Amino acid sequence: MKTSFFSFAKMFSLAAVLLLANALTAQTAADEKTILGMTDKWMEISKLGDANAMTELYADKATAIFFDGTVVNGKEALRETFKVFMANPNPDDTMELDEKSVRFLDADHAVLTYRMHGTTSMEGQKMDWKAVGTAVLVRKGANWLIELNQDTPIMQMPGQ
């Protein structure tokens, strides 16, 4: 009798673990889809030049580090920065994101990495550029928000 009780208990425990793992995997897949969808929303907002909508993707105490090394802390400071960046868009500028990847640190924290490339005009000169970006996201209720975002230009290192 002991053997069958323990066998049943082991099987029940295994079934419970498998069900929990399936639920967590499904949740992770849904969260990954949501986070990757944020990159599409980010691109759409960038093209529209909507600083307020862009800011809503960020947490209240978020930090962003931009291409030029500027560090901006806090949602309202980010809003003002986005307003400046988006004030005079150049219709010939392009930007694409690819190689997007999400890694979950736990159920409420994730790291998004991506590559960016495009063209821009600076001081009358058109230039191609490439960068890699990282965003640390946190779940706030039903939403994922950016806590830290850094975009780093890719440049050829000496000897390459």
Image (tube, rainbow, N blue to C red):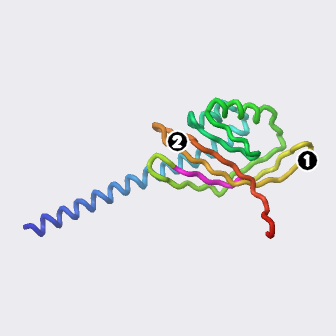
Whether residue 99 is situated above or below residue 58 in the rendered picture: below
Residue 13 numbered mark, or none: none
Residue in the foreground of this view, choosing between 74 and 7: 74
Residue receiving disc 2: 144
- The spot of residue 83 in percent (x, y) is 73, 31
Q: Residues within 10 Å of mark 1 (few under 14, many from 20)?
A: few
Q: Residues within 10 Å of mark 2 (few under 14, many from 20)?
A: many
- The spot of residue 57 in percent (x, y) is 60, 37
Residue in the foreground of this view, choosing between 61 and 140: 61
Whether residue 36 is situated above or below residue 76 in the rendered picture: below
- The spot of residue 94 in percent (x, y) is 79, 47
- Give the quarter of the figure containing the C terminus: bottom right
Residue 125 numbered mark, or none: 1
Q: Amino acid at mark 1?
A: Gln
The boundaries of the magenta stretch are 110-116
Secondary element at tag 2: strand
